[in-house]
Image (cartoon, grey):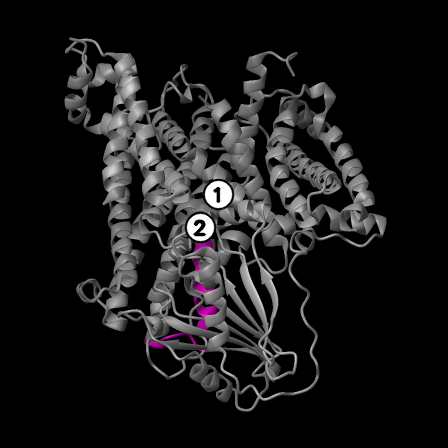
Amino acid sequence: MAALREASRAVDDSSPDRVASVAYYAVQTARLVAILAGSFYIVAGLDILFARFLNWLGVSQAEAVTWAVMLGFLLYVGIVMWAFAAPVKHRPASVIVFLARVMTCVGIMLTPGVIS
Amino acid sequence: MSAFPKRDFRASMTWLHSWAGIIPTLLFFAVFWMGTLSVFDKEIDRWMQPESRYAGPPIAYDLDASIETFIGAQNGVEVTSLFIMPPKPREPYLYFYGVLAEEVNGKTYSYGRFVGESNEMLGEPQSLAGSGFIFPFHFKLHIPGNFGYYLIGAVALAMLVLTVTGVIAHRKIIADFFTFRPTRKARRVTLDLHNLMGVVGLPFYFLFALSGLYIFAGWFAALPMQTVDGVMGKSPVAFLELADSQSPKRRPRAGQSIAMDKAIMPFKTQAEALWSERYGAPVMADRVRIEHYGDANATVIVHRVFPGRRVTMAQDRIDFDYATGTVLYDQQATPATATRSWLEGLHFVQFEHWPLRWLFFAGGAAGCILTATGALFWMRSREKKAGAQPFNIRFVHAMTVGSVTGIMLATGVFFVANRFIALGALPPGIAPIEWEPITFYIAWLLSFIHAAARGRSAWMDQCFFIAILSLSAAVLNWVTTGDHLIKTMTTGMWSIAGMDLLLLLTSALSAWSAIHLRGKARQRPFAVQGDDPALQPAE
Amino acid sequence: MVVTAVFLLCAFSCSALALSQDRHWRIVAAQNGVARKDVARALGWTLLIFSLVFLIWREGPSFGVLLWGMITALAIFATAILLAYRPQLLKPIAAILRRR
C-alpha cells in the first residue's frame, strides 16, 4: 500500500523519473489508460447528443451520425490534452471517468430521439 | 487554462507524449509495419500464391460460363449466395465466393478463381498471403473476437494524440526543421531522426490514424453503448447501423425455386451504363453479388467500391430483382458519407496511382522509423541514467527489439515458409493455410526471447537474420517457381519483380546495418555514454 | 515523370527555405557572404505553392493535395539528408541566394 502511495505521488511529478520503480510504471499506465478510455466515453456520449442536435436541425439521420462521429475523434484529442494539462489537484482522471459515465448514460437515454 | 504557466503545459504534454508513446510501442510498430506492407497487399498475394500469377493484357472473361462452372463444381450442394469480383490489373483473375446451403468438409463456403483466360477453376488459395494475413493483422492483430479491433482503435486514438502532443513536446521542431546531425552522439542522432521523421510525415500520420478510425467508427462508437447497455439493461445502439441506415434491409427468401437461366452479365452492363451516364465517364463495376441464388426473390447487387483513378471510395450500388430485372435500389453518396469515403479511400490505397502508392509506402516506412527511434530515445535516456540495467529497462529493451526487428524477422520467416508450401515440404499434420501464421508467431516469440537473452547485441543479430531471410525468400521464389528477376522484369510481371527487388533491398540494408552495428559494438562495448547536460528528456 | 519533376522543384524550394536559416547557411556557404533570407523564403514558398497548384491542375484536387503532401515530405527529408552528408551539393543554390 505504501509502495502504491509512493508510486501515485510520483504521478504528481510531471517530469518522468528515469529510474522509477515497477509500481510507478504500473500507475502511469493505469492513469494513461483511464484518461484515454474515459475521454473516449465522453466523446461517444457527445457524439450522440451532437447527432441528435443535427438531426433536430433537419440533417438526415445517417448524415448527422456520420458528421458527429467524424467530429468526435477530433474533439477527443482536445479532451485528452486538457486532461493532462489540468493541475493534479483536480484529479482529471477521476473527473473524466465520472463525466464519461454521465455522458454515456445521458447519451443512451436521449438516443431514441436520433433513431426515430 | 490560462492560469497555468506555459512551461507546465509543455511539460505535461511531454509527459503525455512519452507515456502514450512508450506503452503501446509494440503495437505501433506492428501496425505501421503491417500497414506499410499492406500498401502492396495484392502484389504480395501474387508472390505468395504463384498459381494466381499472370502476365498479359487485360483479360476477357465469360462471367456466365464461369458461374456455371462454379455452380457445377459444388457436387450438387446448393449455393445460397454468390460473391463475384471481376479481374483487375492488380488481381488478374475472376474471383468467386459462394455460401453453401450445407456444410461440406466442415465449411459452409466455397472459393473459385479463374486465372487469365483459363476455364479451369482453381480452388481455395493455399496461402493467406498479403490480403489474408498481413492486411488484417494491421487492424485486428488476428485476435479472435472483437478485442483486436478495439485494441487497434485505442492505438489509433493514441496516435492522434501523439501527433498533436509531439509538436508541443519537441519544442525546437521549427528551428530544427531540416536538421539531421549523424555525427553527434547516438542519443542525439536518434532524437534528430525521430524529429525529422515526425515533421516530415506529420500530416500523413494524422490522416492515416484518423481515417483508420473512421473506417471502424461504427464499432468504436458502439463500444461504450454496449458497455452501458450491460449496466442499464437497454438495447445497444450500433452507430454503424445508424450511419448505414440508408442501405436497404436484406430481402427475405421467397421459398420458391426458380431456374437461374438468365444471364448475369447484362445486369452488370446495365449498372455500368447507368453510372457512366450519371458521371459522364466510363465506370466499371468491381463487385457483383447474387443473394438468394435459385430463389424467386433472387437479387443481383452490383457495386462499385474502388473507383480506379480516384481517391474517394465509391458508394455506388444498384440492386436488381433477378426475375423481373427491375431496379430495387439505387444508392448515391451524400455529403457526409462522401467526406468519410474520401478518408477511407485514401487509407485503403486501392486507387490506380502508382507514384502515390509508392509515396504512401515510403510514408509508412517513415512511420516505422518514427516509432522505433522514439522507443530507442526513451530507452537510451534511461540507460544512461541507470548505468547498470535494472529490470524494467531490460524489459523495455527486449520489447523494443522484439517489436521492431522481431516482427520484420517474423515476416521474413513468413515469406520463406510460404515457399515451403510450393515445395510441398510441410511437417505432417499442418494444413498449408495454417503453416505460415504458425511460423510467423513462433519466430516473433523467439525474437523476444532472443532479445532478452542477448541484450544489446540482439539488434545486430536480428538484422543479420533479416538479411539472410529476405535473401533466401527471393532465391527460393526463383527455385520453386522459376520466376527469376530477369524473367519477371522482361515479361512485365512487375508485382513479382517488385517484391523480389524489395526483398533484395531489405537484405542489403539489414546486412549493412548488421555490419555497422558490429563496428559500433567493437568501438565501445556496452559503454555508458557521457552525460550531456544540454540534452533534456525531450527537445 | 510529373512526380519526379515536382519532387525536384520541391527539393529546390526546401533547400532555399533551409538556406534561409542561419544554421544551414553556415554549413553550406559560410565564407561566401550573407544570405538574402527574404528572397530565399519568398522563392521557397512561391515554388512550393506553385507546385501545389500545378499538381491540383494536373492530377485533380484529391490526388493533387495528397501527392503534394507526400512529395514535400520526401523533399524535406532529402534536404535534411543532403545537408547532413553532402552540403556542398547545395552550393549552386546558395550562390543564387547570396547577397551581392
Which is nearer the N-term, disc 2 or disc 1? 2
Which of these two is toward me, A86 or B417?
A: A86
Residue closer to the observer: B173 or B447: B173
x, y percentage for residue B50? 33, 71
Instruction: Say which of C17 and B150 sits in front.
Output: C17
What residue is rendered at 27% in x and 26% in y?
C13
Within the magenta stretch, is there residue B442? Answer: yes
Asked if residue A20 is positioned above or below residue B438 in the image, the reply reads above
> In the drawing, what numbered circle is on residue B208?
1
The residues colored magenta run B423-444
Residue carrying label 2: B35
- Main SS category, magenta section: helix
> In terms of secondary structure, where does tag 2 sit?
helix
In the rendered image, the quadrant that contains the C terminus of chain B is top left
Within-10-Å neighbours for mark 1: few <14, some 14–19, many 20+: many
Q: Residues within 10 Å of mark 2 (few under 14, many from 20)?
A: many
Pointer 2 chain: B
Instruction: Please tell me whether residue A107 is drawn above or below residue B162 in the rendered image.
Output: below
Mark 1, chain letter? B
| Circle nearer the viewer, 2 or 1 | 1
